[in-house]
Image (cartoon, grey):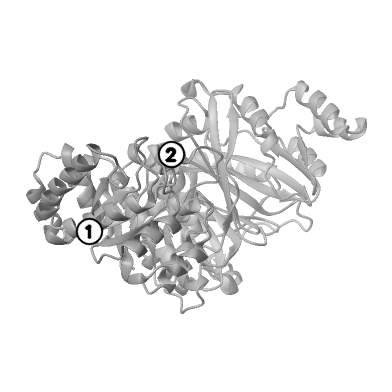
Amino acid sequence: MKTSIASVCLSGPLADKLQSAANAGFGGVEIFENDLIGAPQDAKAIAQMMRDLGLECTMFQPFRDLEGMPEPQRSAAFARMERKFEIMDALGTDLVLLCSNCSPAALPDRQRMLDDLGELGELAARHGKRIGYEALAWGRHVNDHRDAWSLVRDVDHPSVGLVLDSFHSLARDIPSSSIGDIRSDKLFFVQLADAPRLSMDALSWSRHFRVLPGQGDWPVAEYVAAIQRTGYDGWFSLEIFNDQFRAGAASQLAVDGHRSLRFLEDEAVRVSGRQPVLPDRVAATSTEFIEFAASDEEAEEFAQYFRALGFTPVAKHRSKDVTRWKQGEINFVINSEPDGHAHSHEVVHGGSVCAIGLGVTDPDAAMERAKALGIQRFEQAVAPDEWDIAGVRGMGGSVLYLVDAAKSEAMWAEEFPHQQEEEGTAPLLTRIDHVAQTMQQGEFLSWLLFYHSLFDMDTTAQLEIADPMGLIYSQAVQNADRSVRFTLNGSLAHQSLSSRFIRNYFGAGVQHIALATDDIFKAAQSATEAGLPLLEIGPNYYDDIEARFGLEPKLLERLRAGNILYDRDEQGEYFQFYSRAVAKRVFFEVVQRRDYDAFGAANAAIRLSAQASHREPEWM
């Protein structure tokens, strides 16, 4: 796939945008007129800059309101276009984007549109240029790529072709199968964007809520597959209008953009039943372990919480100050080594989660896919007698280890041979239910793409959760059998719990870990008796759920006594209680699911309010 990106996607001066695009691996850039106008360099200097960076100017855009205009606007539009050809000469591109007319003055006369496009084709041919005609979803008379294609087809001029944009097609639910009618020699360019499903006018939707392929809800892979079946082998270019992206770093968006196109290319090939470009998305089978970096003092605090939750320190590492705590299928590791990655993480963030180990079926294929997607490999010196576990860089400088699921028992036996205490025979907590990661809102879509493109995981709908100090946005990624789940949380509100966590933690990371139990009441009682600092839930909550769900008094009293939250939907029930935060950073949730697949979002605001009432002074 020949990859391009529109300069409008990226933030900053045009020179910085070009550098970011080149660094990320793009072959070309569409130059947006406003970026060129605002640049201190002239068009020839921009063209030289692109050549020096190994970039091709794939298209100049946009040109508006030409076909079907009355006089004198029509003559003025043709004169403007001729001047644009001069700019294109300087930029070194032969293709200009002509958007379907949106002017109230545009006439609905189809023959007049054909005549205008034909005359424009003649003008372009004399200048050695090509016109790419695109149907805008809000075009006055042409707002469907089928109508745009019928005009291009009937004009049948070698200098006039079609530009397809996935946003304009998919926003109007135009079947991708209709692309099969388009001749590949008349398809001059393809622009790509994804988007969340929203109920709003197409113009506002397009200008503010486009996202990268793989970050939204649309079948963009099917769209691309339909284009490839025509025989088209030209540029696939990202055109993203998004307020969040414009406020973010151009370098990160460019990296994400190139990753999204690599992911999309592979998905489109699979849709078509052809040989995949990349190894399969990684099948994650379990959350094998969570590693905590902690000083000796903070390690003691973690140990107190672990014991209160029913964990046992079962073994020490063969040569390092690292302890394995276990309960059921859950493995926690406390790393207090005075050097290495965990130590560096602890110096920056304090006692916190520095690594997560996921059980996978094929670590080598997983690393090959990660490399192809531009995901950075984690490397650290490994002693000759230690296991060399494959890993990639994760959120906030943490590590995501990819553990060979078939060899995990051998790994634990060999790496942690020094036995300590015997694990209890009847664990109350059985496995890790989900891991909640908190990040800047600007990183949210980046990490969503990271998980969705690397792992065989689906995504839930994005939720807005009411924090007492502002909204928090939350979305989950999870595998098919729900043995691995991550919830991603971000907020633009300066004083929300998510934002305070990031300030206190100095970056993104794991804010809480949810642990599954088969008996929430016994788990809550055990934790209370063991001295686990619990998050206290106010009495009004229980009055509300009694009325809302019609709960029996005995059940209500048990919930109240354990500070247990409750939710119910059409499928089942959900019970949850929370600890206070360890080292003011990480807290724990204990959950019991009874045929319930969500995350208790109805209770999130209650939890956040309870936590807000316990704000630490430095968080005020």
The structure residue drawn at horizontal position 13% and vertical position 53%, both measured from the top left corner, is 91
Residue type, numbered disc 2: Leu
Residue 85, placed above or below residue 615: below
Dot 1 lies on which element?
helix
Residue nearest the viewer, comparing 275 with 354? 275
Residue type, numbered disc 1: Gly
Which quadrant, please, contains the N terminus?
Answer: bottom left
Cα distance between the residues tagged 2 and 1:
28 Å
The structure residue drawn at horizontal position 32% and vertical position 55%, both measured from the top left corner, is 114
Residue 549 in view of the camera: yes
Does residue 20 appear left or right of residue 257 in this picture? left
Whole-percent x and y of residue 86?
A: 10, 50
Whole-percent x and y of residue 302?
A: 57, 42
Residues tagged 2 and 1 counted as in contact (Cβ below 8 A): no
* Quadrant in which residue 162 is drawn: bottom left
**Residue linked to disc 1:** 121
The structure residue drawn at horizontal position 28% and vertical position 54%, both measured from the top left corner, is 115
Residue 537, placed above or below residue 570: above
